[in-house]
Amino acid sequence: MADVTCTRCAQTREGFDRAPFPGAIGARVTSEICRDCWGQWLKQQTMLINHYGLNVMDPQARQFLTKNLEAFLFKAGREEGVDTSKQGTINW
Ligand SMILES: [Zn+2]
């Protein structure tokens, strides 16, 4: 198991043997993100899905989650805050 110096938490921790996500982002996660931070993202993702009532089969929902994944793990772009006053009223 290869260690990775994680972009998000700056710790050298256990990384991935196999990309946990498809495409270029998955490759980047494999080379830059530790398992701990990925686990935190999965929790965040579940929270976003529940909070916004997302259908993960919906391409727009997937795009939204991918954007948040990048913000969460790589500090790129804007991360969607979970504002409880806006529950169920997300604007695409
Ligand atoms: Zn990390």
Image: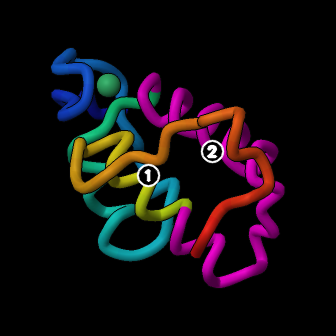
Kind of element beneath mark 2? helix
Residue 92 located left or right of residue 55: left
Q: Where in the figure is residue 36, as x and y percent of width and height? A: 46, 23
* Residue 51 image-quadrant placement: top right
80 above or below 27?
A: above
Q: CA distance from mark 1 to mark 2?
A: 8 Å
Residue at 45% x, 53% y: name it: 68
* In the displayed structure image, the side of residue 60 where residue 89 appears, left or right: right
Is residue 37 or residue 66 the one in the foreground? 66
Which quadrant would the C terminus be assigned to in this image? bottom right
Q: Quadrant of ligand 1?
A: top left
Residue 28: image location, x then y, percent: 26, 57
Label 1 neighbour load within 10 Å: few <14, some 14-19, many 20+: many
Q: Is residue 43 left or right of residue 73?
A: right
Q: Are marks 1 and 2 in contact (CB under 8 Å)?
A: yes
Residue 88 % position (x, y): 80, 54
Which residue carries the number 1 mark?
A: 69
Magenta residue check for 75: no
Residue bounds of the magenta highlight: 36-64
The kind of residue on which mark 2 rests is Gln
Q: Which residue is mark 2?
A: 45
* Residue displayed at 35% across by 34% down: 15
Q: Nearer the viewer, residue 49 or 36?
A: 49
Q: Position of residue 79 (x, y in %)?
A: 39, 46
Q: 24 or 59, which lies in front? A: 59
